[in-house]
Image: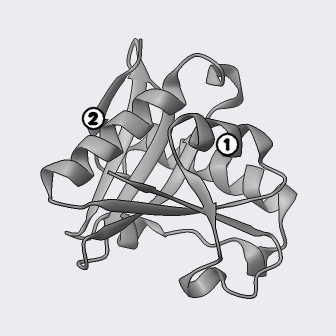
Amino acid sequence: MPVVSLESPRRDDVLSLLQQADDFALALYPAENYHRLDIDDLEKADVGFYVAREDGKALGTAAIVDRHDGSAELKRMFVTASARGLGVGRALMGAVEEHARNRGITLIRLETGLPQTAAIALYERSGYRAIPAFGPYIGDPTSYCMEKSL
């Protein structure tokens, strides 16, 4: 089972993982439809950045962004291809949801894309449901938005 903890996004192996996530997304979507947080954004005080590791190896990331209105947004959720199906995504989801609950957040929203069927299935198994596009995703034909009440 992976160990998930808050970490700096600037660690070399984490930077490599974030680059893999970027490459994966940019292979699926045009750049203008890729809504990511950059490293500086991931270090802000209202962001919890989590890394899943097994035997010290970084296998996945997830960030939770407090919107200061009782809600948060899940960002930068990514699991390496070799670790998919091994519970890494579930472990990351559990960590970000616990993070949110500990801060009094009662709603988590997220945006993914229709081509990411495995991600959508993970979110559905975790209790997320489809919602209309919100915020910067309104009008983006590639966006698929979801939310979960905690």
Q: Secondary structure at mark 2?
A: strand
Q: Up-down: is 87 above or below 60?
A: above
Residue 115 in the image, given as x and y percentages of width and height: 84, 52
Amino acid type for the residue under numbered disc 1: Ala
Q: Nearer the viewer, residue 129 or 145?
A: 129
Q: Nearer the viewer, residue 70 or 10?
A: 70
What's the residue at 41%, 18% (across, down)?
A: 2
Q: Are marks 2 and 1 in contact (CB under 8 Å)?
A: no
What's the residue at 25%, 79% (across, down)?
A: 69
Q: Is residue 146 left or right of residue 40?
A: right
What's the residue at 62%, 22% (across, down)?
A: 83
The label shown at residue 86 is none
Mark 2 or 1: the one toward you: 1
Q: Is residue 20 left or right of residue 116?
A: left
- Residue to which mark 1 is pinned: 119
Q: Within 10 angstroms of label 2, few (less than 14), some, or many (20 or more) residues? A: some
Amino acid type for the residue under numbered disc 2: Ser
Image quadrant containing the N terminus: top left
Q: Earlier in the sequence, mark 2 or mark 1?
A: 2
Residue 33 in the image, given as x and y percentages of width and height: 75, 76
- Residue to which mark 2 is pinned: 5
Q: Up-down: is 15 above or below 82?
A: below
Residue 51 in the image, given as x and y percentages of width and height: 39, 38
Q: Within 10 angstroms of label 1, few (less than 14), some, or many (20 or more) residues? A: some
